[in-house]
Image (cartoon, grey):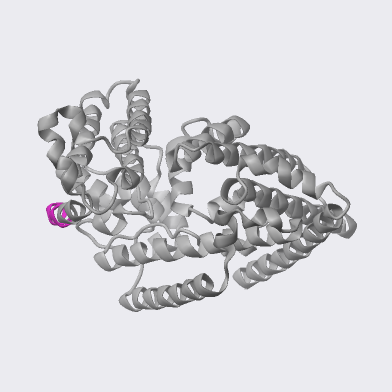
Amino acid sequence: MSVVWFLISLAYILHLHGACVVFVLSIASVNYFLAKILAKSKSYLYVLWIFNISILLLNRIYEGYSFSLFGNHWAFLDNYRGSFRWQICFNLVVLRMISFGCDYYWSIKETQFDQKKHVVCCSICSSGKACYHFLQERRLHSCQYSFITYLAYLLYAPLYISGPIVSFNAFASQLDVPQRSHSVGNVAFYGLRWVLCFVLMETMTHFFYYNAFATSGVWRQLSPLEIFIIGYGVINFMWLKFLVIWRYFRFWSLVAGIETIENMPKCINNCYSLETFWKCWHASFNKWIVRYMYIPLGGSHKKLFNTWIIFTFVALWHDLEWRLISWAWLTCIFFIPEIVIKSSVSSFTFRSATGKLLLREMSAVAGAITITCLMVANLVGYVIGPSGTSWLISRLVKKDGFPVLGFIFLSFYVAVKLMFHIRDIKQNTKQI
């Protein structure tokens, strides 16, 4: 199946990128042979990361490279660059190249994954199926790290353009033994739900003009409350847009027999902490970051330090823009108090009813503050930009701005209390 999917995917990206497929295959080949030659070296992971981040930045700086850079006799190929810029899709290919390199490097080392213990504890694996975590963590045979399987993984057509992101181990495990976690009926119902989400997005596009206000600059003529409403609308539209994109390609992958992590498993309006928000937005990317960045960097022992490195990488991975760097660093600033407060609260045990009530109220206030900070970060990143931050602050500190802030904060507080109620109902249902 690796040969079959490589040929199908190659035809697919030839249509997308035309002659630029040469760049994709050349960079991918260098990454593969670096892994095969240096994987036994202790410094290999440093080489892997430096190579891939350098490629990521150079692709954007040179805008996918012109064939004329390699000589005027190749300049004619610039007329056959396809219909889709290859350097945009290659951001995801970079993640896959890092995944392959790390998985291959770890396959040579001693594994700490206890398969027997996992099968006993996991409800999916104990039923005779294989969960995604099991597919990702178990050791593969060395022959599965072949060049053709590697290329099939990088170019896999259903997930090539936008993901969801799947690790190399999980992909290679399902090539010859398709997923059995989802029945044909479940996959069909999943496709029907996608159609309904698509109809909803089309309705929002035609009747709600949040993005037009944001991109045209008309927001400067509006009140602070109206700007926050636009920011709230933009982030909801972004959530729905990415949900439609990711679930379409995941549906295609499920039909083809490859299971991936579900992006956006939780509604954006049911997240009251930054940690929950990021786990439930680009969930497959979050899992990738945890496996290939967070844990290797020291995990929870260096959480405050890791946060800055990870969010800076996420911003650079998306694009080379100062507004995204600003968004990333603002998110880090807002993230740090949440991390400190959570670690402090976890060390206390509230047994009395008064103590539990006080903790719940403080958590609701903290959740409202978190949502407010998240709104500000996204306003800076996607609506007003860094240059509009001082203007927004000057509007909010005026006499008519404080009631707006109070109303917004109260609304978020009530919403967090409702989220707590939904969480409690779900937990009680699971216990029953």
- Of helix, strand and loop, which mostly describes the magenta segment? helix
Magenta stretch encompasses residue 7: yes
User: Which of 86 and 175 lies nearest the eye of the viewer?
Assistant: 86
- Position of 70 with respect to 202 (left or right) is left
Q: Is residue 100 above or below residue 261?
A: above
x and y, in percent, of residue 163 in the image: 36, 54
Q: Is residue 57 above or below residue 362?
A: above
x and y, in percent, of residue 208 in the image: 57, 70
Magenta stretch encompasses residue 22: no
User: Which of 389 and 52 lies nearest the eye of the viewer?
Assistant: 389
* Residue 360 visible: no
- Position of 376 with respect to 153 (left or right) is right
- Position of 342 with respect to 38 (left or right) is right
x and y, in percent, of residue 342 in the image: 71, 44
Q: Is residue 149 above or below residue 122?
A: above
The residue shown at (53%, 36%) is 322
User: The magenta stretch spans which residues?
Assistant: 1-8
In the picture, residue 108 is in which quadrant?
A: top left
**Quarter of the image containing the N terminus?**
bottom left
The residue shown at (24%, 56%) is 157
Residue farthest to the left?
Answer: 73
* Residue 129 visible: yes
In the picture, residue 26 is in which quadrant?
A: top left
